[in-house]
Amino acid sequence: MKNTEDKKQKVYKIVEKSGLWYAMSGIIVVAGILAIIFSGLNVGIDFTGGTNLMIKSDKTVSTGQIRDELKAMGIEKSVIQRTGKESENICLIRMPELENAKRVQLIENMNRNLGGIEVLEVDHIGPSIGEELKQQSLWIILTVLGLLLVYITFRFEFWSGCATIIALIHDTLVTLGFIALFGYEIDIAVIVAILTIMGYSINDTIVVFDRIRENSAIHKKRLPFVDIANLSITQTLSRSINTSFTVLLAIMALIIFGGATIKVFAVVLFVGIATGTYSSIFIAAPTLAAFKKIKI
Amino acid sequence: MNVKQKLKLLGVIILAIVSVVIVINKPIKLGLDLQGGSRLVLECQDTQSRKVDDQAVIGALEVIRNRIDGLGITEPVIQRKGQEQIIIEMPGVKDPERAIKLIGETAMLEFARADVPIASEEVLASGNRLTELYGTNSRLAKYDIYDRRGNLAGQKTIILKETVLTGADLKFAGIGYDSYGAPMINIEFTAEGGNKFYNVTEKDTGKPLAIILDGKIISAPNINEPIRGGKAQITGKFTMEEATDLVIKLKAGSLPVPVTIVSNQTIGPSLGQDSVDKSKIAGIWSLFLVAIFMIIYYRLPGLLASLALLLYAFLVSALFSLGNFTLTLPGIAGFIITLGMAVDANILIFERLKEELHSGKNIRMAIEAGFSRAFLTIFDANITTIIAVLPLLWLGTGTIKGFAVVMVLGILVSMFSAIVVTRVLMEALVGTELIKNKFLVLQ
């Protein structure tokens, strides 16, 4: 068990090492941007429109055979992926928008030529709907950022609000970078994950800022802001880590046991919340300290 | 414990029992992605004769509603979206393709005067021969004919003239069987329709009458004699299913404007069931993992927090059930996330408690100070998550909405569980031997 007397004296010098923290995050964000530039952002049909078909075949069917069926219907571009267990013969087919009648025809053809086909899931999104969703998502993210800025300004003060928003943007960029690096598909679930991450990441930040406010009241005359910040971060460290830890535990259970449909969502959340905790400790307060220095 | 604390403890226990009872007895409504089903977005289209306006969309809604009723789907959702779109949700639909076909087809039924071509196609097609022979409204058309066993026997050419009756003139449509036992449609015209029918059959005796569905000739029987009484039969190559669907369409009326399907999300029931099963396991594991962590790190208070967490899980489930909300897969994920978040408030309180104890307060005062000082921080933290997630109620589909509902509900209840329930449990133990044991309480 930690000796609390020692802890009173040991204050982690976090703010002083700001450069290091920004650099670490910067590396991932840059890697992500490079990934986006070179391999493109994998945007799902929720936003681009298109048709996803998940089928289960009685017999083992090769992706080549499926591609031939698609070509026979005039579908040139498609991505075919095996998913699930080997023995289950489940395939996910992604293609540009296929109208209803043609899709029915395709399934009939496949049934005839490839043996019994069961359609597990159809996801057909027209391009106008995709465009609409894209607009809505962007608006919501901007609105939420704005609302959170207002709220933090209201509860603390404007510079705290700015520091928080910077931490949030950092979290979003790192999460997107991670998604780009691993080629995950950006669909509506990713937007949901980003919003959840934003809402949750602020929690830790508030805990730290709350403590900063408390310590400022006590130590203002004696200590410069940087020391107050360090003290606050040190004092709230176990709190920040533990609260995130429990959520990460719960998400871990989802990743391991939850099944393929929810897995990507859970992984994105995991990365985002872990990043959020990191940013609350290593980015938010140092940024606030930087603002204070500029102000003074 | 004083009386007030005893009552509060009793209250918590009753709440727990009630929640468990509700969860066991009232099933939770499952979303499309968990029970299987289809979600369609239809868009009304302009035609040459009609532009999409309010009337058209409302008319289409009505027709679609009747058709879905005809399918016997339980608890469908049929809603207008914006100016020209219609959202349809069909939970548990067994044959989504059939339903989609049924809903999407205009089902415009027309009875047109017709005639037998007296010359070959080429002759008729040249110049104005058609108009000379048959009048200005006439056009050439082909239709399929079938033999007795229902196989395609060939194509016949026919001259189509003006439409004299439509599906709107029908009073009744039902299934019947012809002399071969094949399904056919019995129809009866309205009084006015019946008169028109008599006039046509009298004028055109010996000529065919074309029956056209959505622009395709499905049948062209010869009129043998004038028909009074307005009753007739439509025979054609129908399977039982096709005949049934046609009757549903005729009864519901034809769509005032055509619709296209701009979005179709269909999930088969086996995939849904798989998700439900896996999520249950994930949920139990997450409860377990979080509880273990809390007990190891915070010991006795951690155990109490775990009990509060269990109550939380049942309470949220019960409220969700009572509120008739629909549970979706993202909703389950959200619930599992809130399990982890629910203890956050406890952690904040316990850390505060540690500090208060170190500053010298006795256990009772430390509990009081801990809970009240931490309250504002807990409130701030939870409100921001709600702010971030609330807009999702308006974005996207029902599956996403399900997530937002669970998160908001979960966060609100978790505040209650952490602040009220844990405190009640802790106060219940104050003064007992367990609390005095330094090992069991925080260092």
Image: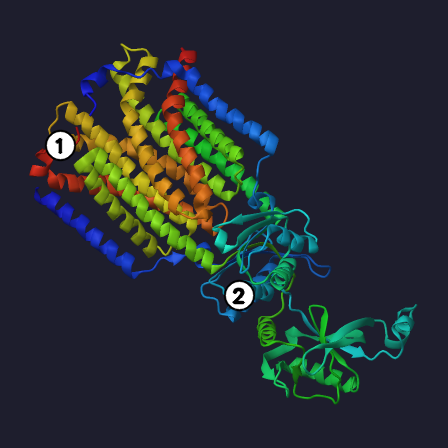
Q: Secondary structure at mark 2?
A: loop
Q: Nearer the viewer, mark 2 or mark 1?
A: 1
Pick whichever, B197 or B20, lies toward us: B20
Residue at 21% over, 51% down: B15
Q: Tell me residue B306's x, y (percent).
A: 23, 42
Going from N to C along the chain, the mark reached first, 2 or 1, is 2
Quadrant where the N terminus of chain B sits is top left
Which residue has dot 1 on it? Answer: B439
Q: Tell me residue A200's x, y (percent).
A: 38, 35
- In this rendering, is residue B185 above or below A103? below
Quadrant for residue B46, please give it.
bottom right
Answer left or right for B194 relative to B424.
Answer: right
Residue at 25% over, 41% down: B291
Answer left or right for A187 relative to A251.
Answer: right
- In this rendering, is residue A286 above or below B89? above
Q: Secondary structure at mark 1?
A: loop
How far is disc 2 from disc 1 in space, using C-alphas? Answer: 62 Å
The chain carrying label 2 is B
Q: Type of residue at label 1?
A: Phe
